[in-house]
Image: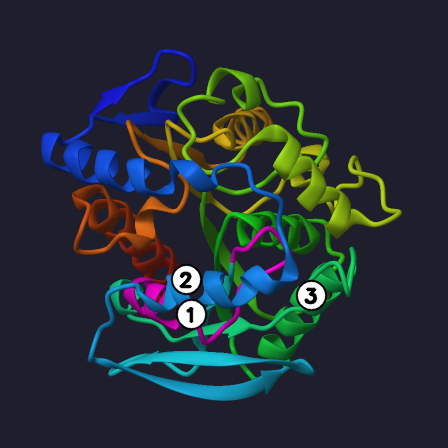
Amino acid sequence: MSTSEGLGNALVIHPLDPQDASTIGQIETAVRPYKGLPWRIEAREQYDALLEGVSPRDDLAFESDTVGGVPGLWVRPASSRPEEALLHLHGGWFSAGSARAYRHLVAHIAARAGARAFVPDYRLAPEHPHPAAVDDVLATYRGMDSSGIRRIAITGDSAGGNLALVLASCVAGKQVSAKAILVGAAVLSPVTDLTLSGATYETRAEADPYFTRQQVAELVRSYLGSADANDPLASPLQGQLSGLAPIRIHVGDDEVLLDDSRRYVERALAAGVDARLDVWTGMPHGFPAMIGAVKASAQALDAIGLFLTARLQEFRSRRE
């Protein structure tokens, strides 16, 4: 690992493993023909099938439930504490993804953290534009709190990372009344700026094997409806960051979304937040889901697991 001078110890750059480089090269060759294609609702099944393909674990159980009026799925390690839980918000550009499809990826996070995780099926665009997803996430958090959970950590990826950071800001700003303590948030390649002003939409335009700015703009319009992209409930980069719980972000260096992560951590640090950004050289969007195929995947998930474990343990110790 090497550390960038720009943010000091808050920005850690992970070198590309040669074996990972070969694997990622093969994946990028396979997906390049589909880069930038317009999103259609019919693609939801394909997206779910992709996430269903994440390497499963055999040491967790899954249970459908409704929390705060929002349906979803509990991911339960063999051992966990009833008074603490993770809330994972899935990706899919606000337009796709499901709790069931994400269960294997979330299982890897929950097992590493030693805590059960709830994955809500928040409402999707374009049928349910902003702020439907945000409303569902807030309702889920309140529901977890009312059920007696006292220590909550938030995780999320891509669009789910956006929702996770929006939720974290709402908690910090007292917009969510809850007895539970938000111990921290760990997110993967979050979408933090729906104005799409990040420079990496240009500087990573060739490197990113999946997305183009035009494609992302269409997805964002579908999600926002008539809402303002500068609304902090839509773009957490525009929100009040002071008072946030500790934040950890992991992102690939080959993503057009790189600046969404980088600028968010810069602003969080300026607001006095305990924040850190891990940038994975040569990695595309969604690389943590490539468990078993890419070394960087397990390494990123291990780091997240250690962070979540430490945060839960710290507040557990305070109560004891």
Q: Residue at x 52, y 78 (%)?
A: 149
Q: Secondary structure at mark 3?
A: helix
Specify the amino acid type for callout 2. Phe
Alpha carbon separation for disc pair 2 and 1: 6 Å
Give the position of the N terminus as an image quadrant. top left
Q: CA distance from mark 2 to mark 3?
A: 22 Å
Task: From the top left corner, tell me how far across and down residue 205 is, in percent.
Answer: 49, 22
**Which residue carries the number 1 mark?**
319
Residue sticking out furthest to the top: 5
Q: Seen from this angle, which residue lies furthest front?
A: 33
- Ranked by sequence position, the earlier of labels 2 and 3 is 3
Can you identify the residue that label 2 sits on?
315
Question: Within the magenta stretch, is there residue 95?
Answer: yes
Residue 152 circle label? none
Q: Quadrant of the image for the C terminus?
A: bottom left
- Label 2: how many residues lie within 10 Å, few (<14), some (14-19) or many (20+)? some
Q: Which residues are magenta?
A: 91-110
The amino acid marked with disc number 3 is: Leu
Q: Secondary structure at mark 2?
A: helix
Instruction: Give the mark nearest the N terminus, 3 or 1.
Output: 3
Q: Residue at x 41, y 83 (%)?
A: 82
Q: Is 319 displayed left or right of 306 in the figure?
A: right
